[in-house]
Amino acid sequence: MKGHVCKVCGFISINGEAPDNCPVCGAPKTAFLEKEDAIKIPQDSNNLSELEKKHIPSITVVKKCGLIPEGCQDVHVKIGQIQHPMQTEHYIQHVDFYIDKTFIARVHLLPDKLNPAAALHLKIGTGKLTAIEFCTVHGVWISEVNL
């Protein structure tokens, strides 16, 4: 899948253009490269390979938040149907979140202290939520759900 990739921090713009400044690290537009294969997608979403099962984010939307009772919904992202390893040489470095192709958050993960998962508490109730994860060995993978 095509995207504009920040050469400084690895952020990927998925809305069809490079931003004036990277929303993660602040790098200028000139730091972005357009790449046709920036994000990996499954060959056949009905017949996933073992590699795809370990890398495609699994998104769960919980309409009633456990922490903020009014105007909040939880989003839980687990990397893979088969749990992805979190080893020093092979781990999920971060998960980026977007709503309607606009970046909203990055969650950094450390291999020795965290599991390959992240969560957000959203104010917004509608739109398309995208989760993009970065594996240090196998690259960038994407998943999307409608809120």
Image (cartoon, rainbow, N blue to C red):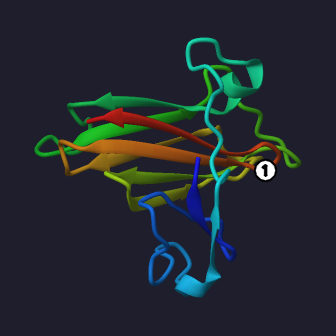
Res 38 seen here: yes
- Provide the secondary structure element on which disc 1 rests: loop
Q: Which is nearer the eye, 128 or 97?
A: 128
Residue at (51% x, 77% y) in the render: 22
Q: Which is nearer the eye, 90 or 130?
A: 130
In the image, residue 5 sits, relative to residue 48, either above or below, namely below
In the image, residue 65 sits, relative to residue 35, either above or below, namely above
In the image, taking residue 88 as reference, residue 76 lies left or right, namely: left
Q: In x, y percent, where is residue 85?
A: 77, 33
In the image, residue 59 sits, relative to residue 130, either above or below, namely above
Report the number of discs: 1
Q: Residue furthest right?
A: 89
Which quadrant does the C terminus fall into? top left
Q: In x, y percent, where is residue 50?
A: 75, 19
Q: Residue furthest front?
A: 36
Q: In x, y percent, where is residue 11?
A: 58, 65
In the image, taking residue 110 as reference, residue 28 lies left or right, namely: left
Q: Which residue is mark 1?
A: 136
Q: What crowding class fits label 1: few (fewer than 14 Cα within 10 Å), some (14-19), or many (20 or more)?
A: some
Residue at (19% x, 49% y) in the render: 124
Q: Residue furthest top?
A: 47
Residue at (76% x, 44% y) in the render: 91
Q: In x, y percent, where is residue 130?
A: 42, 44
Q: Look at label 1 and name its amino acid.
A: Thr
Res 27 seen here: no
Residue at (83% x, 46% y) in the render: 137
